[in-house]
Amino acid sequence: MSEARTTICVVPRDKFVHALPSLSSILSATPASIRLVYVDGGSPASVRDALARLAAEYDFTLLRTDYYLAPNEARNLALSHVKTEFALYVDNDVFVPDGWVAKLEAAADAHRATAVAPVYGIASGALETSRVHHAGAQCRVVDVDGARVLDTTRFVEENADPDDVLSGLVARESEQVEFHCFLVRTDALVALGGYDENMMAVHEHLDFSMRLREQGGTIWLEPSVFVTYLVGAPAWSERSYQLLRWSQGWTETSIRHFATAWDLEPESFGASGLLRFSAANRAKSYRPYRSVIGRLSVSRQRLSRSIPDRTVGNLVYRREERRRALGGSARVAHRATWDR
């Protein structure tokens, strides 16, 4: 059996309702020789227990905290267990196709790429309804009338029909990865210092992509791999995670840090839109308590801070931040044979 070149790192995105089906997709589409590290940041008991059983059955390393993690925190925890040439990061709501690992590795070899991104799909129901979410883009600071502005122009229009665009895509250099799924060379990631944990809620992928390219790295799009992530409302038991993950506090921290790091005015990279985006995600947890008009506003991301957001949202945010402060270090719930 050949030595594994890649370690898959699964991390939480903003809910756990898709975690077990997503992991099943990864396990069924991936050779058994591939190493896997799963970071479980505070999932409900039913998911926690199922992950523990699967870790023992499939021999992957399972890391656990009893509090919620920001995604970049989870990515750094996984990185400490990666000893292979590549790390392949996947969010816990992503579904992958057969052969995905080998194709991403082959693309890295063919183009000498530092990181490789698949084409990303998005679906809110059945996977067959997936639309194109992202298929490569620019990611650079440009001068517009004397002002520094972030340019993230996409190569393919968002929400396109995959049947209309996938056959016409070719491998090409891109300037950004999405964090839903991407392959990266471990040595380059370590040299970068891992992931910036001050980027807690938004634009983490853009900050990472620009830092990687600033270091001399290259990013390539591999169109033969199409992955899909599922969106939707959180389960009742995980609403607190949704409220923390997209909290105004975490979003504003990310915006301030990104602006400072890249010498940008917040509106030069759409800060008000990012605040609306986070508010729309929080609002999914308030759905039973919102009026018809409020629900319509959520669907169109036209939000002011609602009464639930200013009361319940703030209370949950403060409570979960206290839990995080007192939570201690992550523990190894199961250590894979290769990780001993």
Image (cartoon, grey):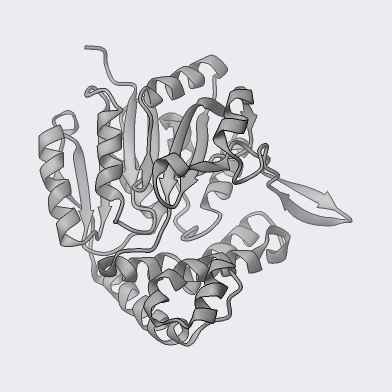
Q: Quadrant of the N terminus?
A: top left
User: Could you say where residue 132 lies in the image, as x and y percent from the top left?
Assistant: 55, 41
Res 259 seen here: yes
User: Could you say where residue 91 lies in the image, as x and y percent from the top left?
Assistant: 38, 46
Q: Quadrant of residue 138?
A: top right
Return the residue nearer the eye: 215 or 303.
303
User: How many labels were placed on the picture?
Assistant: 0
Q: Residue at x 30, y 29 (%)?
A: 83
Q: Residue at x 56, y 54 (%)?
A: 203
User: Could you say where residue 243 lies in the image, as x and y percent from the top left?
Assistant: 39, 71
Q: Residue at x 59, y 64 (%)?
A: 274
Return the residue nearer the eye: 134 or 40.
134
Q: Quadrant of residue 258?
A: bottom right
Depicted 120 relative to depicted 272: above or below: above
Depicted 116 relative to depicted 285: above or below: above
User: Could you say where residue 181 lies in the image, as x and y percent from the top left?
Assistant: 44, 39
Left or right, 245 with respect to 301, comes to: left
Residue at far top of view: 1
Left or right, 302 with respect to 91, comes to: right
Res 217 seen here: no
Q: Residue at x 46, y 43 (%)?
A: 129
Left or right, 120 with respect to 215, comes to: left
Residue at far right of view: 145
Q: Quadrant of the C terminus?
A: top left
Return the residue nearer the eye: 237 or 181.
237
